[in-house]
Image (cartoon, rainbow, N blue to C red):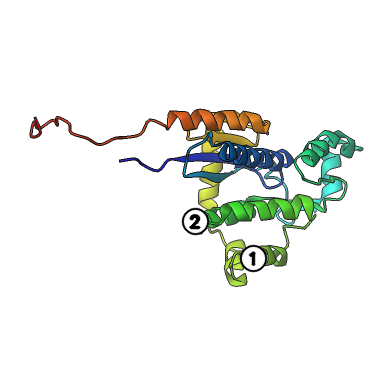
Amino acid sequence: MNKEKVIRIDVVSDVVCPWCYIGKRRLEKAIEGTQLSNNVQVKDIEIIYRAYQLDPSVPNEGMDFQTYMENRFGAGFVSKFQQVEQAAQIEGLDFDFSSLPKAINTFTLHRILTIALKDGIQAEVKEAFMKAYFIDKQDLTQENILVKLLKKYDWSAEKTLSIINSDIATDEVKEEMNYYRQLGVTGVPFFIFNQKYAVSGAQPAEVFMEILEKVSKEMAVEMLEGEVCDVDGENC
């Protein structure tokens, strides 16, 4: 019997990581390219976003982005990120590091994404968070903004606020981050295909396409059921 084949991609990333957003777009482009070329014969590709914090020391209320970045990289930090902005532009993302309102602690966002995975909307919520932060320049430490974003996915204000103002999924997020640290993940984005092939960084779409095609070919050997001799000798 032929079985449906699914390629699972675990993406370790942080909401406020610019290269994670760029890598996300490149992966999406690769998936679209393989599907259009019929080189990847799978019913579906499952993407699961895994938690990672670039800087867990940022206070929960966040801090002024300019001050935060100057403390880390010195005055004139914006010029150091021109390469990132240019790479983002190529992928259709309009980054402007001079106008981001806050550096934020993303732990609560990862807790929300953990619940969103269980609800089957994680990919949509991940995109909504990254777009809100990098493109729309919204302050994701504000409860009303998160409520509004998640209302689009049929989450009530009560549900969103109950997650924000509790420790729901705290242990799961901590365990997940610890698991990938133990695997040796020290930078993001980090992509794992079918728990077998690992790719570090926002690689070009062509690299992702090659890996998808390689994984698909390995999955191409299908199980066929027919007459066999079994261990009990009943069929022979």
Whether residue 161 is situated above or below residue 24 in the rendered picture: below
Q: Position of residue 182 (x, y in %)?
A: 53, 32
Q: Position of residue 146 (x, y in %)?
A: 68, 62
Amino acid of disc 2: Lys
**Quadrant placement of the N terminus:** top left
**Would you name the residue on which mark 1 appears?**
152
Q: Residue at x 82, y 53 (%)?
A: 101
Q: Amino acid at mark 1?
A: Lys
Label 2 packing within 10 angstroms: few (<14), some (14-19), many (20+): few
Which quadrant of the figure contains the C terminus? top left
Q: Is residue 103 visible?
A: no
User: In the visual, does 169 lie left or right of 74?
Assistant: left
Q: What secondary structure is marked by label 1?
A: loop
> Which residue is located at x 63 percent, y 42 percent?
28
Report the front residue among 210 and 60.
210
In this rendering, position of residue 118 left or right of residue 68: left
**Image depth: mark 2 or mark 1 in front:** 1
Kindly state the secondary structure of the residue where label 2 is placed: helix
x then y, percent, for residue 3: 36, 41
Count of numbered circles on the image = 2
Query: Percent x, y for residue 177?
Result: 56, 41
Q: Pick out the residue farthest to the right.
A: 76
Please tell me which residue is depicted at 65% across the width and 40% down the height of the picture: 29
Q: Earlier in the sequence, mark 2 or mark 1?
A: 2
Q: In the drawing, does residue 221 fall left or right of residue 60?
A: left
The residue at the far front in this view is 37
Q: Residue at x 48, y 35 (%)?
A: 194
Residue placed under numbered mark 2 in the picture = 118
Whether residue 177 can be seen here: yes
